[in-house]
Amino acid sequence: MDVEIRRTAPGDAEDFVEVLSAAFGQRPSPDRFAADVADIAAVRGWHALADGRLVGVAGLLDLRLTLPGGSRLQIAGVTEVGVLPTHRRQGVLSRLMTALLDDARERGDPAAGLIASEAPIYGRFGFGAADRVARVEVETGDASLGEPPHEEGRLEIADLATAQAELPGLHERVCAVRNGMVSLPLFRSRRRYRDAESEVGGFGATRFTLHRDAAGAVDGLLGYRTKLDWTWSTGPRGDLQVEELWASTQEAEASLWRFCLQHDLMRRVTANWRPSDEAFAVRLANPRAWRQTLSDGLWLRPLDPAALLSARRYGREDGLVIEVYEPEGAAARFRLEGGLEGAICVPSSASPDLSLGLAVLGSVCLGDAPLERLHRAGKVEEVTPGAVARATAMFRWSPAPWSGGFF
Ligand SMILES: CC(C)(COP(=O)(O)OP(=O)(O)OC[C@H]1O[C@@H](n2cnc3c(N)ncnc32)[C@H](O)[C@@H]1OP(=O)(O)O)[C@@H](O)C(=O)NCCC(=O)NCCS
């Protein structure tokens, strides 16, 4: 099959959305289609044509990623990837990905990031799973919340317009304090609320609650839906589903979780895409009530390892030479010196202490996946004895990275 890759022209957004919808097996309503077309105009898009017909699409967004230690780095956000079901597994995505990564390199982005629809797709292109996100489920009757702590702030019911207005600023404040967070372009934050007024899966329209600090500034935002179940013999057994819970302070986070778990008529609270180390889980007198299942969140593909590794901080002061090989096999070496105050990473010709693939580097660079575990799994080669333990201590970071959601 002859595949040609070219940039999406300004008038091609409708074709782009047609192909993307077909790839995902969806037929959006006319309103939804129009909104998607408007969104695509803000993405740097690529078309893949086979024998002159559009068969695949992909896009890039400029995003900022928060690294361990707090610095924020521009990354290329890969998004809107789809290939027609009639043209799968013939190398169309591979061709698109080459174009996307070349473009990101030309712009000087030190890494590309994405959220994967399916986990096996992107490892072959050098992406590694960089944070873990939790699906949480709590039976409210089991939670044992105990007495509420003294609070300076207060909760307030909010409408959709207020939530929409508050989200961008609050999201930025969360990005500033949490490694792994990815900035949300304004048009993407509006997209989060597209279905807010409709029922989804039997759950009612989204309701919002804000947390304000003592001075009245918003430091927490909760969006949730409920499904009521009136079973008279056992009492009401409602479900509360957290759609989003953003908080820039521990007080706001705990207060919004208590609000969910103490909501009248609800027996079960569920939340998706939460951090793997949510502090509220260990506030419960019965932490066993907090049931969570972990999955991959953000996938990172280093493009300039030296720039990426220089920008973060490290859990222990140390220095190592790391050999990093590309999916195609070419290898480069870097000398990394880093600690809690900062780091320097430069190309090196010295013999390496460790050797690993780009995808493994993507997995460890936010401080989550322990290098030692990847070594046990045969994904990291230890050349200098003891280097794996030293690198594990260096790269580990707390709190765990949390990417926060789709972009
Ligand atoms: C995922 C998708 C974009 C892949 O496109 P594609 O053109 O079929 O991919 P390619 O042919 O370039 O595949 C490259 C390699 O990845 C593998 N691969 C692709 N999709 C895969 C998947 N879902 N699971 C496992 N492997 C996959 C292929 O087998 C191929 O491996 P090979 O080189 O060893 O043969 C396409 O199947 C699709 O549109 N899916 C539905 C929408 C979607 O999930 N989009 C991704 C959003 S993040």
Image (tube, rainbow, N blue to C red):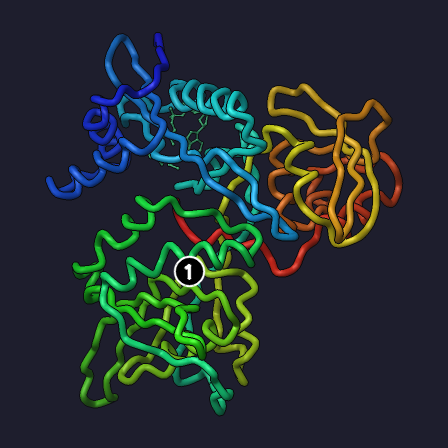
Q: Which residue lies furthest to the left in this view?
A: 30
Task: Check the image and name the residue furthest to the right.
Answer: 385
* Residue displayed at 18% across by 88% down: 232
- Where is 315 relative to 359, above or below? below
Q: From the top left corner, tell me how far across and down residue 108 is, in percent.
A: 55, 26
Q: Quadrant of the C terminus?
A: top left
Classify residue 345 by image quadrant: top right
Q: Horizontally, is 104 left or right of 195 in the view? A: right
- Name which residue lies at 49% across and 53% down: 295
Direction from residue 217 to residue 300 in the image, left or right: right
Residue drawn at the location 23% of the way across and 63% of the way down: 160
On the image, numbered disc 1 is attached to which residue? 170
Q: Which of the 4 quarters of the picture holds residue 243?
A: bottom left
Q: Residue 213, how many percent across, how many down? A: 44, 75
Circle 1 SS class? helix
In which image quadrant can residue 362 be found? top right
- On the image, the x and y values in percent for residue 223 come to 31, 65
Q: Residue at x 17, y 38 (%)?
A: 33
Q: Which amino acid does label 1 sit on?
A: Leu
